[in-house]
């Protein structure tokens, strides 16, 4: 989940590298560094801390050269420190490299290299690769890389420079994201497209096992046996401004306010309300195919997992097929029951989440049909899946996911409706209501955003708390899980979500005078009376209740202390405006506490290691 960047061309490499790292810092920010080729030597500068530490140093101590690599780190092996920062180099300085991923057999390789006399200066797995490539170097940079990579086990995206061949960069990819940017008299390496979008819109989306050799004039792609590979150029169409703050104080707030547009984009061309038709261009499941499915798995991590919970609820409701949810990091080790009558749904914003990818590959091996839900065209999950639903949220930079979540939920709604139609279980009255509601979702999201001032004031009442509770029933419980996650990850407030009916089975013991409970009351049907009773139980223990409710749920006003009203909407779709309120509540609480909203401690945007 670290960020890597590389450049070779006519510009000063360090300037390009720093600019690229600024776009990638969301992937990790406990240290950063660059390595630049200079007159058959490699100059390495790296420091613990935010990228600003490195930038400040380079302002006073510029590094000149037209070929280099850079890195921004999220620590896995070895604590954040100068010595553990990337790039890592061989003893004699011949090889320097940056790495995203984990080398699983690094201990065995380290022992072997130590016996040969190589000296290790860090606690990382990455340094092993630098020494290993050096050990394999016998006059050919490319041969050394391919020989070394053949001995690695694990996940890696590597960008490598060699002092003896300063006119080329080499990059290798296995299970960690990597793209190659194609310019005029210059070429680029990066973990993500925003890092190089200032310079080019033409990229190669690199597949597993690919070795890329870059010079200023061309890019050559090989497999691990050095056989040439042909790859089509992918042209990026979205605007570079999408990767900047556009006047907002934080990326997270910008992305919260981008949700109406993201929702509209995700729905565009996919729904015909009048005809009650769902058109999913890369989801080719036929009625005959769906009739054969006897079980559906949804697997994801973090926020994507909570979007999947919504999907489970809606698929079972609309299509009447059994659905199991599982956190990706647990799925593979539970000996899951999968076969050729299984539909496996993998949800990943980046499309590169290591745990989710591993689960998807296991399911595919066992014969399951794979549906990927992702925000990134050409990402690993989308390339390896049978069917794809893109979320069209646009680039999401803040570590805390907002518009990716809401568009994942909409994709799950669309998938559930499609499956309901294929199964013949979608009731006409329910279909009428939800089909009429979906085109209005962007407007409902905009209305929720108009409550930001009220939410900002309300957040001041909870800023000093060390703990906060979220409750809900049905869809509102799954929404409560996401709300609690947002609060804890960006404001560092201990937040827990519970099904409201479970309070009496233990959690109510935690409540006392001054406790704050956020009660989700967006379901106007059979759940409403029950959640009101739960709020009364909470109030009897002296707790303060903040409710989020549709305006038609008027009875909530008699029991809650504060209410954030959302416009009336079909219950199954109320989670969209409601989650925007929860995002705003977490955001303003974080601001009030002085936290780093876009870069919460210990977290990174894309978790590309297990």
Image (cartoon, rainbow, N blue to C red):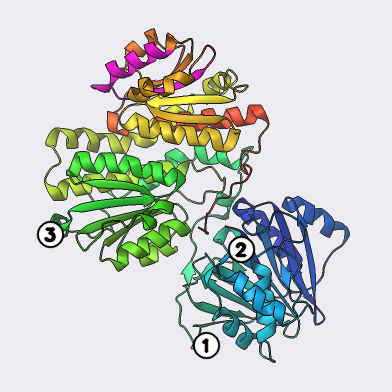
The reply to whether discs 2 and 3 touch (Cβ–Cβ < 8 Å) is no
The disc, 2 or 3, on the residue closer to the chain's N-terminal end is 2
- Neighbours of disc 2 within 10 Å: few (<14), some (14-19), many (20+): many
Disc 2 or disc 1, which is closer to the eye?
A: 1
SS class of the residue under badge 1? loop
Q: In the rendering, at what x and y percent does residue 534 appear?
A: 35, 16
Look at mark 2 in the image and give the residue it sits on: 196
Q: Is residue 453 left or right of residue 308?
A: right
Residue 582 horizontal side relative to residue 143, left or right: left
> Residue 205 shows which numbered tag?
none
The residue located at (16%, 47%) in the rendering is: 421
Percent position (x, y) of residue 167? 71, 82
Residue denoted by label 3: 288
Q: CA distance from mark 2 to mark 3?
A: 44 Å
Viewer-side residue, 308 vs 259? 308
**Residue found at x 71% / y 67%:** 87
Residue 253 visible in this rendered orientation of the protein? no
**Quadrant assignment, res 500:** top left
Residue 110 is drawn in which quadrant?
bottom right
Please determine whether, in this image, residue 572 is positioned above or below residue 346: above
Badge nearest the viewer, 2 or 3: 3
10 Å neighbourhood of mark 3: few (<14), some, or many (≥20)? few
Q: Position of residue 536 (x, y in %)?
A: 38, 11
What is the secondary structure assignment of the residue under circle 3?
helix
Q: Secondary structure at mark 2?
A: loop
Q: Are marks 2 and 1 in contact (CB under 8 Å)?
A: no
Residue position marked by numbered label 1 in the rendering: 226
Extent of the magenta region = 513-538
Give the residue displayed 72% in from the left and 85% down from the top.
165
User: Quadrant location of the N terminus?
Assistant: bottom right
Bin the neighbour count of mark 1 within 10 Å (Cα to Cα): few under 14, some 14-19, many 20 and up. some
- Report if residue 502 is visible in the image: yes
């Amino acid at each position: 989940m670290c960020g890597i960047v590389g450049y070779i061309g006519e510009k000063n490499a360090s300037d390009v590298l720093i600019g690229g790292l600024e776009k990638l810092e969301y992937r990790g920010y406990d240290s950063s560094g660059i390595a630049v080729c200079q007159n058959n030597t490699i100059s390495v500068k790296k420091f613990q801390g935010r990228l600003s530490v490195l930038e400040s140093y380079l302002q006073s101590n510029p590094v000149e050269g037209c070929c280099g690599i850079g890195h921004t780190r999220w620590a896995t092996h070895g604590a954040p420190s100068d010595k553990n920062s990337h790039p890592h180099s061989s003893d004699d300085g011949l090889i320097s490299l940056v790495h995203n991923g984990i080398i699983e057999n690094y201990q065995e390789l380290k022992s072997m290299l130590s016996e040969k006399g190589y000296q290790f200066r860090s606690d990382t797995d990455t340094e092993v690769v630098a020494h290993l490539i050096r050990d394999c170097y016998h006059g050919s940079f490319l041969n050394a890389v391919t020989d070394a990579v053949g001995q690695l086990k694990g996940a890696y995206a590597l960008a490598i420079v060699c002092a003896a061949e300063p006119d080329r960069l080499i990059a290798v990819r296995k299970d960690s994201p990597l793209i190659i940017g194609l310019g005029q008299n210059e070429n680029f390496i990066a973990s993500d497209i925003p890092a190089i979008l200032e310079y080019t819109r033409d990229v190669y989306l690199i597949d597993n096992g690919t070795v890329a050799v870059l010079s200023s004039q061309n890019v050559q792609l090989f497999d691990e046996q050095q056989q040439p590979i042909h790859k089509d150029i992918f042209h990026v169409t979205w605007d570079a401004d999408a990767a900047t703050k556009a006047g907002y104080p934080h990326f997270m707030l910008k992305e919260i306010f981008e949700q109406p547009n993201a929702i509209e984009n995700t729905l565009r061309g996919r729904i015909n309300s009048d005809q009650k038709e769902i058109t999913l261009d890369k989801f080719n499941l036929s009625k005959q195919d769906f009739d054969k499915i006897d079980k559906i798995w949804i697997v994801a991590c973090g926020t994507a997992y909570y979007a999947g919970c919504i999907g489970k609820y809606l698929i079972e409701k609309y299509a009447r097929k059994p659905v199991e949810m599982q956190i990706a990091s647990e799925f593979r080790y539970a000996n899951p029951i999968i076969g050729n009558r299984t539909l496996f749904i993998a949800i990943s914003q980046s499309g590169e989440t290591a745990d989710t990818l591993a689960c998807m590959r296991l399911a595919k091996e066992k014969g399951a049909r794979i549906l990927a839900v992702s925000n990134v065209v050409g990402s690993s999950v989308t390339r390896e899946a049978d069917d794809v639903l893109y979320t069209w949220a646009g680039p999401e930079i803040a570590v805390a996911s907002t518009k990716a979540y809401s568009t994942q939920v909409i994709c799950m709604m669309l998938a559930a409706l499609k499956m309901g139609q294929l199964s013949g279980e979608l009731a006409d009255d329910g279909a009428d209501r939800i089909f009429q509601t979906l085109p209005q979702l962007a407007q409902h999201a905009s209305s929720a955003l108009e409550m930001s001032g009220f939410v900002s004031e309300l957040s001041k009442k909870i800023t000093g708390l060390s703990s906060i509770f979220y409750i809900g029933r049905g869809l509102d419980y799954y929404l409560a899980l996401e709300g609690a996650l947002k609060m804890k990850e960006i404001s560092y407030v201990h937040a827990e979500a519970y099904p409201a009916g479970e309070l009496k089975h233990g959690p109510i013991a935690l409540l006392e005078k001054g406790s704050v409970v956020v009660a989700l009351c967006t379901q106007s049907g059979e759940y409403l009376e029950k959640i009101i009773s739960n709020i009364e139980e909470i109030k009897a223990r002296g707790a303060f209740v903040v409710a989020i409710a549709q305006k038609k749920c008027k009875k909530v006003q008699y029991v809650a202390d504060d209410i954030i009203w959302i416009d009336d909407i079909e219950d199954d779709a109320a989670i969209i405006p409601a989650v925007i309120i929860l995002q705003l509540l977490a955001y303003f609480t974080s601001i009030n506490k002085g936290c780093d909203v876009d870069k919460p401690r210990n977290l990174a945007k894309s978790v590309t290691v297990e």
